[in-house]
Amino acid sequence: MTTRRLTMAQALIAFLQNQYVERDGVENPFFAGCWGIFGHGNVAGIGQALQQVAATFRYYQTRNEQAMVHTAIAYAKMKNRLQTFACTSSIGPGATNMVTGAATATINRIPVLLLPGDIFAERLQAPVLQQLEWEHSQDISVNDCFKPVSRYWDRITRPEQLLTALPEAMRVLTSPADTGAVTLALPQDVQTMAFDYPEAFFRKRVWHIPRNRPDVASLRQAAQWIRQSQRPLIVAGGGVHYSDATAMLRQFVERTGIPVGETQAGKGSLPYDHPLNLGAIGVTGTLGANRMARDADLVIGIGTRYSDFTTASKTAFQNPRVRFININVAEFDAYKHSAIPLIGDARVTLEELLPLLEGWQVAAEYRALAAQYNREWDAEVQRIYTLEHGPLISQGEVIGVVNTLSRPQDVVLCAAGSLPGDLHKLWRTRDPKGYHLEYGYSCMGYEIAGGMGAKLAAPERDIYVMVGDGSYLMMNSEIATMAQEGIKVIIVVLDNHGFASIGGLSKSVGSDGFGTKYRYRTESGHLDGDVLPIDYAANAASLGAHVIRAHNRDDLAEAIRQAQAYQGGPVCIVIEVDRRQRVGGYESWWDVAVAEVSENPDVQRARAEYVEHKKRERYYLGSEE
């Protein structure tokens, strides 16, 4: 048997370089490179291994370990999970900085490979710098924190363990149903140990991404339920995009007349102006989508995990006879809400379901109602886009300017704050990949790093990162990385002097925005003084961005045009917005518990309203018929 003597770290990188994926006959390398920050836990192992293959496997220098995972996630999301990055860190805080990123990846079902350095397997040196000691076991480190937020976790304590660990890691990373963060903890001494690895281990391997098909009997039962329904509704989730099913979904709805409501991950499943597209659904939904969800007698979920925002905390679907059909690659999600589970790829499942519905479609009146809601919502969007209430521009107006001036193929990217809800309702998506929201974890700080990942995945598109000042302050360090790499991302910072989203939520529960505004502390002991004079433009400029300040609608429009023409690295546009001017809720509700006992009359009123709303929550246990 031919062997190659390599360190464990060298063998790991050599293996990653030769992993490919294929779907529908299209093949590409699975790893686009490796992001990392080096410390004593990985510099002599993974760092050395990356250095000697730098010409064929690109290393990217990052400024924050959490941020590099966000970058990898955004890249993989834009690539429909068919390509991703590896991310390496040192031991201790470098590793635990990645835990939030791991959670973001796993919750969103996005593949990313994490390679944190670990303590010495030898143990002689313990406790080493940055080592967690636990008196009940020596077989633990901070990397054990990754276990609950990883889809696969392993610690490589001998170099030959790569021979079994890496194929398992790839199995999970390339699985449509089980993908997420994969963590391989790498003790710093083991990284440098040599072993005679079989040459066959480094041969090119192509992982086929299957299009699994659902059970035939379940498919027939689902077709029967659809034929029996009077008011069916499709909830399109991220699985529509990941299976490349947007064209098939359009064919399906045009043949059957079933209208579509879109989750955050599913937005763009249909063009915004398609007459059967009701737009956003749930807590951040449109009026038409929420009304048709309320009355639906059959809900067909496609690639959705039914988060509380999608179901409006289990209040969205109020028909007592509502039933569910769930199309999903994951059995776990397919069975939710006592549904008929169609466990399979979204595209092929729709392809096989459609012939079983030959000759059937919804009533003309129902189809016309969906088209009416579509037109009425577009008029509402236009009203908000052109509000011009002044003197400060509203967030909805900022969205309108960016959306109107961007090209159909361009991408808006966001993750947290009040922007995701407004974007979900207001962004007119014209391209299936034109809307990029990380809302499974809604992780503050994802935006700027994610924008870089999206741009690397789609260099032909302009990426518009829309971010509030709160998320901007959480993590803006990757502006420097974009400047270093010459990566152009257009960052629009909305300055509303604090956490506007939670400020509004705080008011709704009777707490008057407590602790959500960026203000000086006064002699009263409260944060109710003057607004903190934070200069976001100066900060972005110091990190290497080309900065444009905007003060009104006209300034913003001109800034967008200048940003589009700019040929350098990152561009940052800063504009102050009115945090009090908000977009409505459109007959939806989100369960955020309100204090049962309080001396505050506002809290007492909010509690009374909360109790009334709670009465509408329900379990979906099947039809009451």
Image: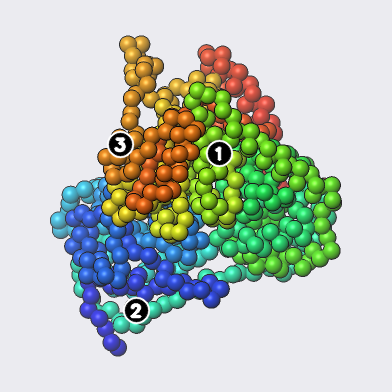
Q: Position of residue 182 (x, y in %)?
A: 40, 60
Instruction: Determine the residue positioned at 54% across, 34% down.
Output: 397
Task: Give the residue at the far bottom of this rendering.
Answer: 1
Secondary structure at badge 1 equals helix
Q: Amino acid at mark 3?
A: Asn
Callout 2 environment at 10 Å: few (<14), some (14 to 19), or many (20+)?
Answer: some
Using the numbered discs, state the Cα–Cα distance from disc 2 to disc 3 in whole angstroms.
48 Å
Q: Amino acid at mark 2?
A: Phe
Secondary structure at badge 2 equals helix
Secondary structure at badge 3 equals helix
* Residue beneath disc 1: 400
Front residue of 404 and 500: 404
Identify the mark nearer the N-term, 1 or 2. 2
Identify the mark nearer the N-term, 3 or 1. 1
Q: Position of residue 471 (x, y in %)?
A: 40, 38
Instruction: Determine the residue positioned at 33% across, 14% down.
Output: 522
Q: Is 165 placed above or below 73 here?
A: below
Please name which of the two marks, 2 or 3, marks the residue nearer to the observer: 3
Q: Position of residue 310 (x, y in %)?
A: 61, 44
* Residue beneath disc 3: 539
* Residue beneath disc 2: 201
Using the numbered discs, state the Cα–Cα distance from disc 1 to disc 2 in whole angstroms.
53 Å
Q: Is 489 placed above or below 241 here?
A: above
Instruction: Determine the residue positioned at 79% across, 63% down.
Output: 357
Identify the mark nearer the N-term, 2 or 3. 2
Callout 3 environment at 10 Å: few (<14), some (14 to 19), or many (20+)?
Answer: some
Q: Is 61 placed above or below 157 here?
A: above
Q: Is residue 511 left or right of residue 142?
A: right
